[in-house]
Image (spheres, rainbow, N blue to C red):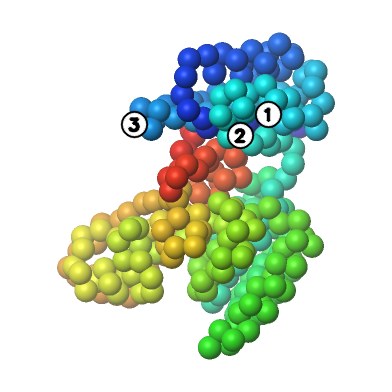
């Protein structure tokens, strides 16, 4: 097994000496830096950085690292930062409706060992995909939502109780065809990942492939983004496209699009698991 590491994701107004001070703090305390990536937004004059170091000989106890870093840097540099540990497995809940392609792809990668995570539950508003959960031996929970959404608040309360019970750290909407409420978004800020079947900001909302067909576009795409209160408008994590022609009909667009959707979603999930995403305003900084 690899030595456990600590990871800091930070952003702050740019000024001379920040990188030197942070790296010196780590090396002075016998931390071996194994990753450093930084970017300066020259328009907003903001520094974004991800730094990772081995904990094996680090002098500061891991439960005190955040306190030390905050004391040394947060006020001095107006720094916004988070500390993570590589040996703490993220716990991912998957929300689905009736379409299985994204769910199968996520679970296959999980079972193949691509991701060092736990998936304690799959949540749905339909029974249709229970057989998939059974194949992968993952608990499957269904809460049906009335057509008039009269029980939506009650359903989300039950879902939130399950998420808390299972210590879920982030949520993936794998073609979950329901709008997430503000209360759940606030409980998981920038920790709910959605896949939208278009190249946002084009064709938001329902049936984007049909919209693309009517518009006569020459490419279609898929977009994975963090969920915010504004529909399909959260910070974009990953996108990709495929070329189409006048011969394509809505059904062929859907078929081509589904291949993109699962790939784009898995890329976004990978970056989130690796703690390589920083959100700022309504954008993301994706570290390599």
Identify whether 176 is placed above or below 171.
Answer: below
> Residue sitting at 56 percent across and 29 percent down?
78
Residue at the spot of label 3: 43
- Closer-to-camera residue (97/84): 84
Q: Which residue has dot 2 on it?
A: 81
Q: Which image quarter is the N terminus in?
A: top right
Mark in front: 2 vs 1: 1
Name above or below for residue 267 compared with residue 275. Answer: below
Q: Earlier in the sequence, mark 2 or mark 1?
A: 1
Q: Earlier in the sequence, mark 3 or mark 1?
A: 3
Measure the alpha-carbon separation of dots 2 and 3. 21 Å
**What residue is shown with label 1?**
70
Q: Do residues under tags 2 and 1 come within 8 Å of each other at their CB atoms?
A: yes
In which image quadrant can residue 284 be found?
top left
Tell me the element at label 3.
loop
Label 1 packing within 10 angstroms: few (<14), some (14-19), many (20+)? some
């Amino acid at each position: 097994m690899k030595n456990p590491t600590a990871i800091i994701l930070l952003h702050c107004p740019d000024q001379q000496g920040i990188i030197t001070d942070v790296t010196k703090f780590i090396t002075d305390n016998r931390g071996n830096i194994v990753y450093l990536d930084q970017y300066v937004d020259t328009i907003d004059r903001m520094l974004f950085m991800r730094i990772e170091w081995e904990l094996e000989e680090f002098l500061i106890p891991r439960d005190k690292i955040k306190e030390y870093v905050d004391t040394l840097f947060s006020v001095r540099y107006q720094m916004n930062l988070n500390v993570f540990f590589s040996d703490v497995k993220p716990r991912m809940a998957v929300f689905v409706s009736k379409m299985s392609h994204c769910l199968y792809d996520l679970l296959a990668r999980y079972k193949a060992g691509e991701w060092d995570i736990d998936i304690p539950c799959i949540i749905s508003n339909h029974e249709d995909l229970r057989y998939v959960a059974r194949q992968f031996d993952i608990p499957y929970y269904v809460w049906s939502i009335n057509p008039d959404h009269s029980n939506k608040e009650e359903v989300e309360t039950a879902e939130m109780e399950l998420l808390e019970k299972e210590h879920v750290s982030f949520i993936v909407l794998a073609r979950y065809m329901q709008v997430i409420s503000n209360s759940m978004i606030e409980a998981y800020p920038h920790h709910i990942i959605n896949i939208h079947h278009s190249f946002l900001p084009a064709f938001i909302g329902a049936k984007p492939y049909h919209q693309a067909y009517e518009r006569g576009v020459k490419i279609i795409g898929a977009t994975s983004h963090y969920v915010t209160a504004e529909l399909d408008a959260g910070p974009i994590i990953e996108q990709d496209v495929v070329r189409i022609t006048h011969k394509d009909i809505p059904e062929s667009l859907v078929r081509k699009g589904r291949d993109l959707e699962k790939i784009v979603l898995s890329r976004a999930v990978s970056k989130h698991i690796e703690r390589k995403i920083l959100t700022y305003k309504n954008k993301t900084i994706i570290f390599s």
